[in-house]
Each structure stands twice: as structure tokens, then as C-alpha cells.
Amino acid sequence: MIKAKEKPLEEIINMVQDFKKLLIAGCDGCVTVCEAGGLKEVKVLASALRLYFTQLGQKVDIDETSLTRQCNKEYLEELADKMDNYDAVVSTACGCGIQFLAEMYNTKPVFPGVDTSFMGVTEERGVYAERCQGCGKCILAETGGVCPIARCSKRMLNGPCGGSDKGKCEVSPDIPCGWELIYERLKTLGQLDRFEKPIDPKDWTTSRDGGVRKIVREDVSI
Amino acid sequence: MSTTTPSKLEKMLAAGNFAITSEVGPPRSADGAVINQKAELIKDYVDAINVTDNQTSVCRMCSLACVIRIKQMGLEPVLQMVTRDRNRIALQSDILGAASFGINNILCLTGDHQHFGDHANAANVFDLDSTQLIQTVKMMRDEGRLIGGHEFEVRPQMFIGAAANPFAGPNVELRVARLAKKAAAGVQFIQTQCIYNMEKFKYFMKLAVDRGLHEKVAIMAGITPLKNVGMAKYMAKRVPGMDVPDEVIKRMGGVPKENQAQEGIDFAVEQIEELKGVEGVRGFHIMAIEWEEKVPEIVKRTGLFPRPKI
């Protein structure tokens, strides 16, 4: 799922301080799972903003909501009737949801309440780690089910580099060396022959290098 | 052993001599004369001179301009090229440009991550990795073709090198497997990471020799003389993939400060003498970091001077 972090309160205050009627809109999807932008975090953010404005003696109306998903139009449409009540919206959905909301409510200022970070997993509650960069052409079959693009800091296809130390990445001892993981997994699977076969230069056209991406599925379109 | 390019380094290795290379680091300014001065200090004591490519991700004068300067002095440069900063278009373009000036040696590297350097906020590229750069140079040289498919007549005559780090732990077998991968990609010579842990290096070489890798690639042992005990400690703690055993730190710290530089040189000389007897070692890559003036002493004391005429 998509992982995000809550933005610092100060940054959000700077964005919204000139508005008097605010909606804080969360998302029940990914950002709820990583506890950054679901209804719970919306309520906390709204309370913090109310406290801030009250202390300044300013009257600012702040409403709270959370949508099933902000990356689908049918859920965003639920806000249509009440959108006129607000000067601006803070969306705590991921960057996709924030943009889709802004796209639908074209005249309304929409601000991000989170920093969208990566596609990853919940290693344990409160610990989220990157696993996929969405390169558009999955090579996990060749690399023992461990992605070198997401998990090697140099996205090497023929690693590891000479900087790994005690199985950790040269960027930080907190990052496991992706290629050490690949090597060990291939060894476990009895596929070490794959490790020694050079992987050719990658076609990055399916990644962001090919321009803005879109999938069109005529078979499922209505 | 037959040669494939006009490279003097390749000829020296093919003749069965211990080859010697050293490196110079470009300046962090437009003062190109620095390169000429450094090259002048070592030119009679080495067969080829590497020029580093923005090493440790610190922005410097480009290695391509520096190797051209060295070539114009009538010397033999090795163009170091990292894939961190340039995509396949720029890398191939620079290889063609280097070849047009008669550069015949290239060292294919991935490069340190930019977080080490003076532009930690930079984006990186890593379109290719070192192994893919080896493949690319080989294809350009042997097939006259770019990755994109364009075919051309005048080909770069590059003797292709790469690095190997036996010490990037914990798994020496993995490091040998990676050497095998680079050999499969077409690498012809290897310059290793600086050796301080002799036992681990010998184990690496034994595994490489057992697999016959020493016959596919010429392995040059990396030597960096230590200036003082502080440098030994710094390398042990701060430089990724470096293995400086405690006894080396103790040895350096065991002599008075004013004698530590000499101790470092003596240690480097002893290492080379020992490495001469290690099967598969075909030469030495002496990386005297900002200490180029010590290269002549090391080469002379190890009986490797004068350099054979090729």
C-alpha cells in the first residue's frame, strides 16, 4: 500500500491561516492503515488547528470527514453538496487522492495534510518499509522475489556494490543491503546461477522515465 | 596472452609483468595544472594513471578532461567512470569522446551514493550499473554498436576494467560470485579495494583462482599507504566496505607520531612483497590519496623500478 507521513502542524497552519471555513478530509484507504491520514488523524489535526486559532482569538470553522477512498470519483462526489460551505480543504489522503479531489472541486483551494512517501509494507505497527517503485516491468522472478530497484539504494540490477558493510547499505546501517538479501534468497532457493548471469540494461520506458503513465483497460471499462 | 586494444596497460599485463597503476584525484576547481603536477610526480613509476570520477560524490573537475590532459603529456591514463551521475546517453557519449583522444583504458564503476558527498540533495541517475557499463563498453568496442542499436565504424579501443571489493562483507563467496559476474560481462582487469586484511584477501584470491577467474581477468591488488593512525581509524570506521584490522591500527599507533608516515610506507611495501607471492595477483594499484609523492619510494623499494619498456 501507499505509505505517508503526517505533515508538521506548522506547515499546515502556514497553508490555511488565511481561511475561515475549513474541511479536513481523510481517506479510509492506505493512509488509514499507516495511521497518517484516516479519520483518527483528521480529528487530531482538526483539534490542533482549532486550539491554535482559538489561542490567537480567531474564529475558524473546521469540519472533519473521511471518504472511503479519495482516488475514486464516486466517493469524492459525496462531498459535492457541502463543498460550498468551505473556503479550503486539507486532504490527508495520499498525493493521488489530494490531486483527484482538487481536480473535481476545481475552484476550491486544496492543501496536502500528509507527505506521501512510498509503496511499502507494514513491518510492524508504526514501521513501514518500501518494497516497490512501480517500474512497470516486474523482475522479481529473476531476483529471488526481492526487488533491487526498490531495495538497492543505487537500484543496481547487478549488485551488490562495494559499499555494503556487514550486510547493510552504505547509505545507512539501518538499511539492509538489497543485494545481500537477493543473494541469500537465491541461495535458499538453489538458484545462485541466476546471480552470476548479468542482467542487461533495463528498459525504463515503463517507469517514470517514459513520461506520465496511464493504464487503459477496455475490457473492464463501462 | 594476446591483446585486444592499443592499451599499454594491457600490453604490460599480457607480457607477464607485474603492472603498476596509480591514481590522481582531480581538483575542486578549474585549475587543470594540478593534474599535470600530480601526474608528473608518478609518471616514471607507473604504467597507467587512473583519474577518479567525482570520488566520494564530491564534485570535482571531470575525469574525462583530466585523462585528456594526461594523454597530452604522453602518458597512459585510465578513465574512471561512474554510473551515478550520467545516463546511458551521456556515458556512451563520453566514451566516444574519450576514444577520440586515444584513451584506451576505462574503469567501470557504479560510484558512491551521493549522500557521502558535497551535494547530498542531488538526484542520482543509476540508469546502468557497473556491470552493465562493462557490457556497454564491450559492445561499443567489439560490435561497434550503441545500446540503442546505432552502428558505427570507428570504435572505442578500450581495455575494460572494474573494481572488486573482497572486504564488503560479510560474505567473501558473494564477492567472488560478483567478480564472476563482471568477468561474464567482459571485464579484462580488476583493481581491488585497498587491502589491509591480508588473510581475507588471500581467501578471496584462493576462491577466485579455484574458479579460474584469475585467467579471465587480470587482478591488480589495491594498496593505499596509511599516513597515520588517525587515517587507519577513519578508514576502519567511516569508509564503507573498508576492512582495517585492529592489528594494523595497533601497528600504526605503536610508533611515535612523527614516524607514523614512514611506518605506513613500510607497511605498504611489505604488503606488496607478500602479495607478489599470491597466485592470481598480476599487478598493483597504488592509491596514495593526496600523497602521490610517495609512490616512487614504494615502487623503488619493492623492486618494481624501473618499469619495463613495452
Image: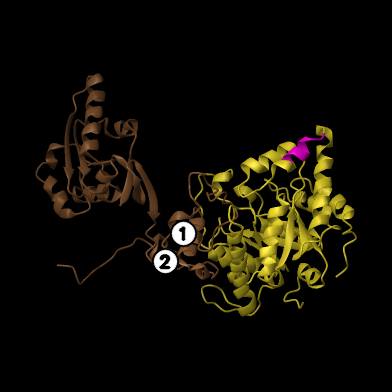
Q: Colour of chain B?
A: yellow
Residue A148 disc label: 1
- Label pair 2/1, CB-CB below 8 angstroms: yes
Q: Are marks 2 and 1 on the same chain?
A: yes
Left or right: where A21 falls relative to A165: left
What span is colored magenta in the figure? B249-255
> Which residue is nearer to you in this view: A139 or B252?
B252
**Horizontal arrangement in the rendering, residue A128 relative to residue A55 (left or right):** right
Q: Which chain is brown in the picture?
A: A
Between B206 and B60, the one lying in front of the other is: B206
Please give the label number shown on residue A1: none
Mark 2 highlights which residue? A139
Give x and y (percent) for residue A184. 49, 59
Residue at figure coordinates x 72%, y 49% from the top left: B196
The type of colouring in the image is: by chain
Magenta stretch: dominant SS?
Answer: helix
Q: Secondary structure at mark 1?
A: helix
Q: Residue at x 42, y 66 (%)?
A: A139
- Dot 2, crowdedness within 10 Å: few (<14), some or many (≥20)? some
Cα distance between the residues tagged 2 and 1: 9 Å
Tell me the quarter of the picture where residue A48 sits. top left
